[in-house]
Image (cartoon, rainbow, N blue to C red):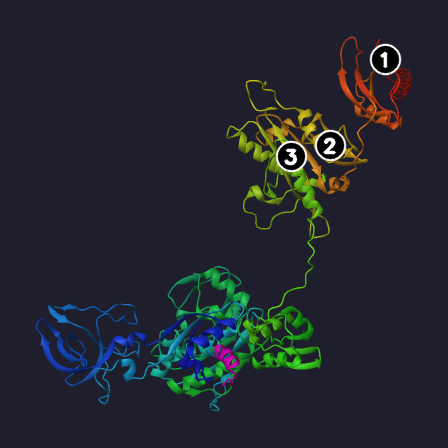
Amino acid sequence: MKVSLSWLRDYVPVEMEVPKLVAALTMAGLEVEAVIDRYGYLETVFVGCVTGIRPHPKADRLVCCTVDTGKQTLNIVCGAPNVEMDMLTAVALPGTEMPDGTILKKGAIRGETSEGMLCSAGELALGEDRSGVMALKKDLKVGQTLKQALKLDDTTLEIDLTPNRPDCLSVIGIAREVAVIQGAQLTHPDISLPEGEGDINAVTSVAIEAADHCPRYAARLITDINIAASPFWLQDRLFSVGLRPINNIVDVTNFVMMETGQPLHAFDFDQLEQQRIVVRTAQEGEAFTTLDDKERRLMADTLMICDGVKPVAIGGVMGGLNSEIEPTSKNVLIESAYFAPTSVRKTAKRLGLNTDAAHRFERGIDPDGTLTALNRATQLILAVAGGKLAKGTIDAHPGPQTPTKLSLSIPKTNRLLGTNYDLKPIQAHLESIDFETEKLDDQTLAVTVPTFRVDVSRPEDLMEEVARLTGYNNIPTTFPEMSAQGRGDHRQRTLRNRLKNMLTGFGFTEAICYSFVHKDSGKRLQLRPDDFRQRVVPILNPISEDQAVMRTSLLPGMLETMAHNLARQTKTLKLFETGKIFIAKKTDRLPDEIEMLSGLWTGQRSESSWNTQNTPCDFFDIKGVVEGLFGALDISSCRFTALADDSGPYLRPGHCAAIVCDGQTIGCLGEIHPQVQVAYELKQPAFVFELNLNLLFTLIIDRIKAEPIPKFPSISRDVTLIVDRGKEAQAILDAVMAFEESLVESLHLFDVFEGKPIPKGKKSISFRIIYRSQESTLEDEQINLLHKKIGQRLLLAFDATLPV
């Protein structure tokens, strides 16, 4: 947003020096990006006197002038028809940067040296007249800069506005902020109109068929106007904010838009068929030619301003070529409307039209400023173009908006801002920017938000206004109360890092995979349709098809990482990952999030070396990793048991196990199913484990229990049983410990054998039991009796026999 100080002074006295004003506006949230001296380029343009004129020897329409600039006499070639002897005019010296960006240089024109340029008003952006050089008053002093001579002194501020401040996309909006900063009174333009002749409703009408896109549409009619160039003051105002004058009607609509923030549009009334306005949405694929002479194809939700037969403008964006103001126009219909920001934003983006009007409408204008801007434009058109005003105003208003009313708590405001205000200064700040306030009690204000502040919708917005108007640099620095005692690390984070360190110590490398996976990941893992891991959360706007849903298992990412490495000749991998999986709920919007730990081992058991064999890893390697984790975590209650076929469909039957702790399954491990290998294009076996960390963390004991080193020696005895082939060795181990013999310290499996002479369907299992007493040295006879007793109980419990 550009605004000149001279224009600001029409509404508020600007008494601050420019640097201080710039700093104050920036601290108020209106960052000033640039300060431009509007007439700085005139420092090298002087008042000169033409002291000699002779014809150009090689050009009939050019003359060679001798010009006195006060300090030197220059030879300048000129083609202006009005140049004459003793004339005072504007002389630009070489090096002058002209308003169009060109740099004036000394040169030769048709062989004659030209040491400068005699300028027209249009060339110096001091008007539109380019028919001849500027004829200056005779009382001016030769040698003065044109800026001094014409007393041209103005500064333009270029302000970078945030999208939530559309109220400042106008000169009056900026003037309101300046008035608050200076404690001055804002003065609005005095608008007065003649009564008018003939009722406007008798000659035209407005029908709104799309009230959700256009809640309000107002219009006035002026007849017998005279299209001409705008007066200098109007052109100068537009030049000051970077707009190009066109004609007096269009210039007025642009002036009022910059002054009030309300975009307007002027239609040639005689080009409107049936001389009425219909506001509707376009038909799908409808063609329309805009003012830039481009045909555009419209979508069904595009808001159109139409006459009785055809579209004449795209609502809030750009007018049509079929109703523009032309030099022969005599009657104009002035539009002032409120268009829904969302509608304009979608249309402008879709059509690639970033106009000044769309820029304001899509951010939100003042719905109650429609008539004020319309009357202001009508007043100015009558002043600069003449004409007769039709009596009355059309104001179609099917969707009136009520002002926002909020309750502001003074204690909460102070708590959030770190201030200590009572009610009065807060009330004064808000009223200074036209908020209406009412005291409910000593701690609460009822605030009515002005309609031009579309960004204020909650009490926190009011608190921000209080802070802004107080001045952020004036709010005392405060610090939150905090305990000097440090807070320990979160338990889950500590345990998670502990697990990572252990796995790294086992030779594994941490992998970090995307939480988004392919929608068919469940099918690739052979999950049944009713498996809870098939309840995926879809991504609304996925990056690609391979990342269309949230993961319900860590394995897809691990297997894809394995495939990626195998394709690059990395055949041995030991990977792990911790992360969350997301299981969709049937009712709630947010999914269940379960933290998991997954590991993968493929390739060789150890790195190739001269003293090792190339032995592939197997099921017992991955099982040993999990056992090592549990041992390091001092979890002794976990058991490995046969996995049901439907529990781990992605694992190879007979080469997998469930991990059960205290009767609760917390994970599984095993070899990846051959069909899953094919689905992920894996050319070698892989062994994986999965652990539910949410459950595992509850099993970890934070306190370490120490026991004294045994004083007395242990005695070991072996037992071999012949049992059914399907009998789990772990069940026998658990049975021995369940006997609760105090002298049994531990036991472990050391041999399993099948084949002759063992009967078919049977297997031989050998255990070693360690006996120890904490009170005395054990005798062989004592242990032999106990060992025999345990053996007999096992024979009965498992229908076992002893080897022959």
Q: Position of residue 101 (x, y in %)?
A: 29, 68
Q: Secondary structure at mark 2?
A: helix
Which quadrant holds the N terminus?
Answer: bottom left
- Residue tagged 1: 802
Whether residues under marks 3 and 2 lie with C-beta atoms below 8 angstroms apart, the answer is no
Q: Which residue is mark 2?
A: 631
Q: Is residue 198 visible?
A: yes
Q: Which residues are magenta?
A: 172-187
> From the image, which quarter does the C terminus lie in?
top right
Q: Is residue 307 visible?
A: no
In this figure, which residue is indicated by the disc labeled 3? 503
Residue 76 in the magenta stretch? The answer is no
Residue at image location 76% in from the left, 14% down from the top:
754
Label 2 and label 1: CA atoms lie apart by 32 Å
Q: Main secondary structure of the magenta part?
A: helix
Location of residue 75 with respect to 392 vertically, above or below: above
**In-image side of 214 versus 688 (left or right):** left
> Which sits earlier in the primary sequence, circle 1 or circle 3?
3
Label 2 neighbour load within 10 Å: few <14, some 14-19, many 20+ = few
Disc 1, SS = loop
Point out the tag, 3 or 2, that comes first from the N-terminus.
3
Furthest residue to the left?
57
